[in-house]
């Protein structure tokens, strides 16, 4: 039943995702309470909150997909630019100039 390193990593990512989702729901709930607090009818407050919740979910999903597509080989740990041919176009060029 022991988990190998390769199985462990996706589970960690999954838990991190779930935690973010949980925080989003908490945030939306507070927003909902706030809307009702200013005198908005509960049905409108719920509709607005749900619209924002799904809006954020769709936005985050698209962003994640865009990042995954643009990252490709990976990103440089130092500067965050795209890795091409297993080299960072910025950091590896700098290294060349310094030497
Ligand atoms: Zn770099």
Image (cartoon, rainbow, N blue to C red):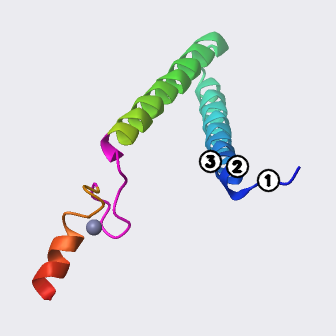
Residue 39, quarter of picture: top right
**What residue sits right under mark 1 in the picture?**
3
- Judging depth in this view, the residue of 63 and 70 nearest the camera is 70
- From the image, give the main secondary structure of the stretch colored magenta: loop
Please determine whether, in this image, residue 18 is positioned above or below residue 40.
below
User: Which residue lies at the image location 32% right of the left edge and 61% below the top edge?
Assistant: 80
Residue 50 on the magenta span: no
Give whichever of discs 1 and 3 has the lower sequence position.
Answer: 1
Res 85 → quadrant = bottom left
Looking at the picture, tell me which residue is in the foreground, 39 or 92: 92
Quickly name the residue at label 3. 13
Q: Which of 94 and 29 is in front in this view?
A: 94
* View extreme (bottom): residue: 99
- Identify the magenta region: 70-82
Residue 20 vs 3, above or below: the answer is: above
Label 1 and label 3: CA atoms lie apart by 15 Å
* Residue 60 higher or lower than 45, as above or below: below
Residue drawn at x 35%, y 50% as measured from the top left = 73
């Amino acid at each position: 039943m022991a988990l190998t390193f390769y199985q462990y990593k996706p589970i960690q990512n999954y838990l991190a995702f779930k935690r973010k989702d949980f925080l989003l729901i908490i945030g939306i709930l507070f927003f909902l309470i706030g809307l009702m607090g200013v005198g908005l009818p509960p049905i409108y407050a719920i509709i607005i909150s749900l619209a924002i919740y799904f809006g954020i979910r769709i936005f985050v999903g698209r962003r994640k997909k865009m990042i995954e597509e643009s990252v490709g080989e990976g990103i440089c740990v130092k500067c965050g630019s795209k890795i091409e041919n297993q080299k960072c176009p910025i950091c590896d060029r700098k290294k060349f100039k310094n030497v």
